[in-house]
Amino acid sequence: MPASDDQTPILRWYVPLWVLFGPVPEFVAGLDDPPGTRSWSLAVPIALGLACAVSGRRPGRHPWFPYALVAGLGVVSFLRGGAASLYLMSLPYFWLPARSARWPVLLSGAGAAAAVGGGALGDGGLATGNSVVTLVAYAAGTTLALAVRRVADRAEARARRLDGELVTARADLAEAHRRQGAAEERERLAREIHDTLAQGFASIVVLAEAVRSDLVDDPNGAARRLSSIERTARENLAEARVLVGSSPRETIAADSVSRTLRRTVDRFAEDTGITVDADLADVDCDPATRIALLRCTQESLANVRKHAAASTVGVVLAARPYGVELEITDDGHGFSVADAHGFGLAGMRRRLTELGGELTVTSAPGEGTRVLAVLPVEE
């Protein structure tokens, strides 16, 4: 019956106490015994103390000592007419090393029987004070130990249950984080696809429709639009490679932000015929800010193309003390901002918020639209 790990420190403290208050008093009492029994009265406590000391070097790893203790109780009781004090001091030793209640009950009972039986053989009687104390100690000790064991078992069972619940909660939390991460990744991909591939395909469709009508009446215009279709398709291919991770994200806006936006507005003017008044300052900003400004410009111009029916668009990029500011205006139909629930505006606002910026959209039916994007710039 090896000791559990949490009982080992208790045993290390109990063993020297047992030696001091168990065998030592028996040894001292044996000094006054008659010469015929003195050597046994001295030898037995010494043997028990040495055995306990050896056992105490590796607590719980010497299952033989409780059995030796039962035998020692019988011999001491026989020699001295009882061993109630030694039995009382030894009771914890029967219980502490055990993992279950069966063997401690049996061993402590055997120790009590040995103490009572040895005393009866020594002086020829059972009804002695030593016998009564030993039996009462056995009954009280067993009752108390079983009650403590029951409480400890319940606490251990509760701890195991809580450990299981904790493991389950951790697994549920990890699964929730995984699902949240997957949902956020899907949302990010949906936003990127809307801002890049979807816009590019929509542009290709519009240009292809224009080419069909210009093939006969305006061959040169059809050729220009075919070139725009080719450029847009190549850009979509590059965007797709970035999305799947085969190209670095920084290649999207590798040039300065002013030159990147200039190419975008020039393409828009060429493809749509809408006049664009662009004032683009040379602002120094990090790649994430450049990409965010490019996406806001692309989304705003795409909305102008699809919904505004505008004749003039203004694009202003300026450095401010608080960061960089991008303003896109048009003289189109306008719309009710409160009733707008499109994916594009929400995606722009979320993209800017992730970088610590903000988006302001001002419009009304018949009054055109103003989109203002503000982003902090790291020094």
Image (cartoon, rainbow, N blue to C red):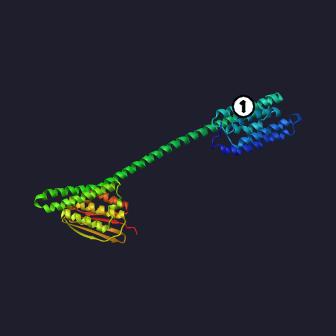
- Image quadrant in which the C terminus is located: bottom left
- Check disc 1 and report the residue beneath it: 110
**Seen from this angle, which residue lies furthest right?**
35
Position above or below: 99 against 183: above
Position above or below: 96 against 193: above
Q: Nearer the viewer, residue 300 or 154?
A: 300
Q: Secondary structure at mark 1?
A: helix
Q: Nearer the viewer, residue 209 or 22?
A: 209
Neighbour class for label 1 at 10 Å: few (<14), some, many (≥20)?
Answer: some
Three-letter amino acid code at disc 1? Answer: Ala
Rendering quarter of residue 19 = top right
Q: Where does the image place residue 13, in percent across and percent down from the top left?
A: 70, 46
Q: Where does the image place residue 377, in percent across and percent down from the top left?
A: 37, 67
Rendering quarter of residue 281 = bottom left
- Image quadrant in which the N terminus is located: top right
Q: Where does the image place residue 49, in percent across and percent down from the top left?
A: 77, 41
Q: Where does the image place residue 354, in percent across and percent down from the top left?
A: 37, 60
Q: Nearer the viewer, residue 256 or 227?
A: 227
Can residue 229 be seen?
Answer: yes
Q: Nearer the viewer, residue 118 or 246?
A: 246
Rendering quarter of residue 96 = top right
